[in-house]
Amino acid sequence: MAHASSNILGPKNVYIIGAQSSGKTTLTSALETYFDNKSDLTWKAVIVRKPHILREVARQVLQDHESTGQDVSGSKLRALELQTFILEAQHKIENAAKSSWFISDRSGVDAIVYGKCFAGESGVEKLLNTTAWKVLNTTAWKVLNTTAWKELEKTLRDSLIIVCEPVLTWLKEDGLRLMPKDPLARTELVFIIHRKFCDFLDDAKFQYTILPDTQHELNDRVSFVIEEWEKIGRAPTG
């Protein structure tokens, strides 16, 4: 069989996104193990390479800038600044992975959603005008009717987006997460963020799939994503 050398012809990228403490990083690591243990990986009858795994950038950005979740929730200016750094870091790792397909723990959408929550709508407008977001997001460049943009939009919109619902028993504070100490406030916050993810994706007309919070077992969560991914691979083209 032929070997896929272009991500446009190869497997769809996978984004694992959602509010904090919804199991995104654990799921991404489990997907990495799944593909590491799988031989003769194929996509539409073509042998393909194993995916690049794009790690979460937000935690490293916060550490690099000596910040915590409290900095994000306590200052709109600081929240916007940090989300811009996070967006740029996501842009950088996606650019580095362009030669193949990838599974990403988070996306550029995350910076926008958290900006909306903690920097306000006006702050997010500044973020939406950054070069990094214009590359990562399909809504900011719709006015550009160019071949380059159409190809970029197609690549982004062809990705599989998995939105993980928050799992209440997994909510915790570790100094870097944006978690109120009060349990009720904590629950309210994560579901507000989850709704903002879905609202933003709906408004931008992204296709996405929700991984329900009733799927607790890691093997079941991996199977859920793989089934959605393989479903795309089985879909007829043209």
Image (cartoon, rainbow, N blue to C red):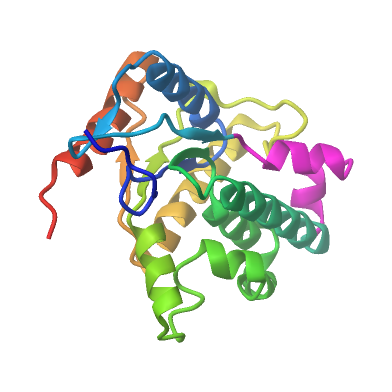
Instruction: State the quadrant of the N terminus.
Output: top left
Q: Does any portion of residue 217 appear in the rendered image?
A: no
Residue at 60 percent across and 30 percent down: it is 183
- Per the rendered image, the range of residues in magenta is 55-75
Left or right of residue 234: residue 107 = right
Which quadrant of the figure contains the C terminus? bottom left
Q: Residue 218, can we see it?
A: yes
Question: In the rendered structure, does residue 145 fall within the stretch colored magenta?
Answer: no
Is 31 in front, or is 219?
Answer: 31
Q: Residue at x 48, y 56 (%)?
A: 196
**Picture mark count:** 0
Q: Which picture quadrant has residue 190?
A: top right
Which residue: 34% across, 17% down?
38
Q: Nearer the viewer, residue 103 or 50?
A: 50
With respect to residue 233, does 220 lie above or below?
A: above
Residue 220 in the image, given as x and y percentages of width and height: 30, 18
Give the residue at the far front of this rendering. Answer: 2
With respect to residue 211, does 78 lie above or below? below
Majority secondary structure of magenta residues: helix
Residue 48 in which image quadrant? top left
Q: Residue at the location (39% across, 79% down)? A: 147
Q: Residue 110 placed where, x, y %?
A: 56, 51
Residue 56, given in percent of the width and then of the height, sits at: 62, 37
Where 57 sits versus 148, above or below?
above
Q: Quadrant of residue 116?
A: bottom right
Q: Is residue 236 above or below residue 130?
A: above
